[in-house]
Amino acid sequence: MRLIPREEKFFIMLKKISENVVIGAKKLEDLVKDYENVEQKAKEILETEHEGDILTHEIIEALNKTFVTPFDREDIYSLVGRLDDIIDYIEAVTDKLLLYKIKKPTKEVVRMAQ
């Protein structure tokens, strides 16, 4: 037993946000590989990005309310910020595909999404 308990919930929360990034990346890969129903797939990616924002805010709120974290507070902030950036970039790519009315992604785009 510890004198000051460590909050292990951060590992669960970080796992959730990491899984959300993977889901977003897989949805982007599916979008560029099977370029059908683009608007619907883009909407699903946007929903995944919104879920990432919610998870990011939950983690930051928990950090602000927690005295002892499992590792450095700054590292958690940095990791969460980078994970949020990734899902934001995934959603931005989707926006650009729609905005520029891309008819079909190039094989290089498909390769990068993989």
Image: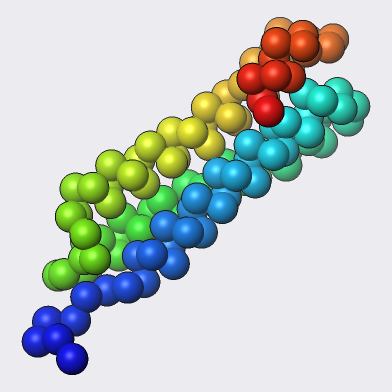
Where 38 sits versus 6, above or below? above
Where 108 sits versus 7, above or below? above
> Residue at (21%, 59%) from the top-left corner?
71
Which color scheme did the rendering employ for the protein? rainbow
Residue 4: image quadrant is bottom left
Q: Is residue 56 or residue 79 the one in the foreground?
A: 79
Q: Position of residue 37 (x, y in %)?
A: 88, 30
Q: Answer whether residue 1 is visible to the viewer in this image.
A: yes
How many labels, in total? 0
Residue 104: image quadrant is top right
> Residue at (38%, 65%) from the top-left corner?
11
> Residue at (68%, 28%) from the top-left corner?
114
What is the residue that sits farthest to the left in this orientation? Answer: 3
Q: Position of residue 36 (x, y in %)?
A: 90, 27
- The quadrant of the image that shows the N terminus is bottom left
Is 104 positioned to the left or the right of 99 in the image?
Answer: right
Is 56 positioned to the left or the right of 22 in the image?
Answer: left
> Residue at (30%, 65%) from the top-left corner?
62
Is 80 positioned to the left or the right of 47 in the image?
Answer: left
Q: Position of residue 80 (x, y in %)?
A: 36, 46
Q: Answer whether residue 95 is visible to the viewer in this image.
A: no
Q: Position of residue 49 (x, y in %)?
A: 57, 41
What is the residue that sits farthest to the bottom in this orientation? Answer: 1
Q: Is residue 32 or residue 37 the one in the foreground?
A: 32
Where 48 sits versus 3, above or below? above
